[in-house]
Amino acid sequence: MRKVLMGLVVVLVGIGGLVTLAPASEIVIATPEEIEGTDIQQIEWENIVHSLVTVPMIRFNRDMSAVKPFMVSDWSLSADGKTMKLTIPQGLTFSSGNPLTAEAIKASFDRYLKISPYATDLEALDKITTEGNVLVMHWKAPPVPALVSLASSYGGLVDVKTAAKITAEEFNRRVVGYGPMVVDEWVQGSHIALKRNPNFKSTFPEAGNQGPSLVDKITVRFIPDDFTRVTEIQSGNVDIIWRVPLENVADLEADDDIVLHSYLQAGCVMFYVNPEAPNLTDVRVRRALQKGVNRQELVAVLANNAQVRHGIMSASMAGFSQKYEDMFAKEYGYDFKAASALLDQAGWKDTNGDGIRDKAGQKLTITAMIGTDYPSSKKTAPVIQAQYKKLGVELKLREFEGKYIKQAVRDKKFDLGARRYQWADGDMLTYLFHTDSKNYAFADIDQLVNQGRYELDPAKRAEIYGQAQALVMEKGLAIPLVTNVNYVAVRKNIAGFALAADGQPFVTDLKKK
Amino acid sequence: MNDLTAYAIRRIFQSVFIVLAVTILLFAIMHMMPGDPIQLIDSPRLDEATTAKLRARWGLDKPPVVQYLYWLLNVLKGDLGRSITNGQSVSVLLAARLPATLHITLTALLLQYLVAVPLGLMAGYHQGSVFDRLAVSVTSVLRAIPYFWLGILLIIVFAVSFRLLPVSGYRGFQSLILPVLTLTLPALADTLRLTRSEVLEVLREKHVTTAVAKGLRPQMVLLRHVLRNALVPVTVMFFLSVPWLIGGSVIVETIFAWPGTGRLLWKAISAQDYPVVQGIILLITLLTVISTTIGDILTGLLDPRIRAELGGRVA
């Protein structure tokens, strides 16, 4: 039988010609999602492609403790945090050949403010001026959250002169920017081929290679299916895969040809709680739900690829406070007796012996909206359901796409709504709990979140965000669950791959052994 | 004007109304879904003011009727609009994806008919034989296998164990083999069984008995009298399959990372990207109308009884 199958395949292969082999200096990367476009200023989501074709001026170092120059020779922020100076090295050019000067960077940011959906990240920016080869950014308030944006792929530089010559659509298909690679060809739905930019120079102090890329070509393939992505790296057809499925972590760890790189999600997986939902208006019930989740069991279900989370922020976020996380663990950590007592006090008791608490003929039934696209939520939801059942709470699980849950939360049409987020700064609380988010409206939370946004002192900032989270928890607006550990699998013949603490890749040292 | 021409003209007029009805229905269904494409951009950092600006930019702040009329007017001018999620022109997106989809769907469809029709013919002619029983049993088993399972099985056997074919991707003939087999194998059963049952029915017809009694060779009877008649419903089925050629197959395209319209449509529906969904469905509807009309005309040409019926209807 084996011979017959072999024979059949040999014939088919014979018809098609020889297998196409990648050149030695080509690296193939697989990501589950296709890019929306190549122009970082026109899109909502970035991925590895943007880190390769449009780099920012500055970046966080690997442990996220400091911001370092990435392509500028020097940068500084004045004591009052209102003047940022960035020195542009002489002789740099975009991949089009157009000079990359302070003026060209100013034009890039002017365009960002005009067209990017994330222009509000720079809302504190007053104006940009240039002094020779120095770019000066004048801020109305210290640019604390803006720094995260500037130091991420969203701060990537594009060649506005080229953009002006073609349509926005064309520029989005083939961006001209400054990065170690240049867009060669984008086959929609399949892959994007990038070629080496021989004129690239980096100033990042942690980079082993500050010159042009060490590979000639990088192909980023879009492989949505988990099985296929994992099979491709195991077969050696792909060198790096993003978003390793949890069920394959152990297999890939045991594979002698593959190394797993992990990073802690900059954020958490949690439930939004609707304080206006009929069975949740009493804060004691909401508190009981917070204390009724045994998060260790959730981590066990996720094969230990997660961390228990008692607050909203995780350790890989700027503004995180361990002191507050410990406090939340004590105050809102798993405590079955305390959770039962709170429900008793709220008048919910099991009067008919069916295992579910009731009050005035009404059962304590709550519906949780689970994200079909949140793998860890799907895995942990039945465990939470069982834990709540012991508490006498009937939890109904309904699956929706994460986007619908987001909308349902805004429309207040939910009891519990699963939420997962990833952003390396505490300013994320603005988008989760500030009145502007339309999710909740509490003046005291708004005040703290606004304050944290422009606080330069890291310790003070962590304290402010700790207090803001304390208010969220006290009001019972969220049930933090876990922070995921995410994995990137890399074949051992690839050297120089590194991730920052928040999962952003470093690509300047990337090469094939 | 002969009957067939009049019939074709009538079908064209009917088609315009069908296409309009489908697009209106689709537009209504899409707008009945909660949220809109901008609200569904699942980005944590998109604030309400920006969301409102984006909605206005895409005309989503206007009533659905106005949005539909704008879309229709643009379509009449040959502009299918732009994708709300990535700003690219729908025509460009379709042009980029259609060739890949047609590669697998067209190859799979042709392979399906080229294999299943002769097998069905032989199985029907030799009813009850070992060949008949084997063909029916094997194709029935294949029919019962889900696409995703078959695709994974083929990858494990041919790409992982024997390492002879690529696991996935859209790079030349070799990458075409596994997705085409995944699409073709389960579909063989339907065509084979339809051909077989038609052959059995035709074999019982008097004109076939007469042909055999006249001493015609079995091959002649089979080709000239049986196959020609048995092919009528098979032809109809073939043309009904044509519109879905551009719809692609989401499952197969996902497993094999194939850049087709199936994945594009699925992604557009989940993102409520109205222009992309409308563009693809418009194309499918047009193809449905055209292919069923061609199918009707061809069956008329194959079968004089149907031709007479068509003529009678027009007259």
Image (spheres, rainbow, N blue to C red):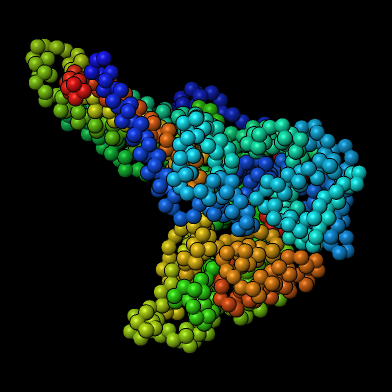
Could one spot residue A240 in this view of the protein? Answer: no
- Residue A325: percent from left, percent from top: 66, 74
Does residue A74 appear left or right of residue A62 in this picture?
Answer: right
Q: Residue most toward the right?
A: A132
Viewer-nearest residue: B79 or A459: B79
Residue beneath the point at 53% across and 50% down:
B61
Q: Residue at x 69, y 64 (%)?
A: A427
| Image quarter (top left, top right, bottom left or bottom right) of the N terminus of chain A | top left
Quarter-of-image position of residue A223: top right
Looking at the image, residue B58 lies above or below residue A247: above
Left or right of A353, for residue B226? left
Task: Between residue A41 and residue B246, name the one nearer to us.
Answer: A41
Q: Quadrant of the C terminus of chain A?
A: top right
So how many labels did they put on this image? 0
Which residue shows up at 43% across the image and 53% down it? B33
**Coordinates of residue A275 in the picture (x, y in percent):** 51, 74
Residue B282 rendering spot, x and y as whole percentages: 42, 35
Q: Residue at x 59, y 54 (%)?
A: B51
Q: Name the one closer to the observer, B59 or A286.
A: B59
Task: Examine the rendered structure and indicate whether residue A177 appears above or below residue A453.
Answer: above
The spot of residue B177 in percent (x, y) is 46, 31
Q: Can residue B224 be seen by looking at this rendering?
A: yes
Please state which of residues A470 and B104 is positioned toward the viewer in this rendering: A470
Left or right: where B194 falls relative to B102: left
Q: Using the rendered view, name the quadrant where residue A395 is placed.
A: bottom left
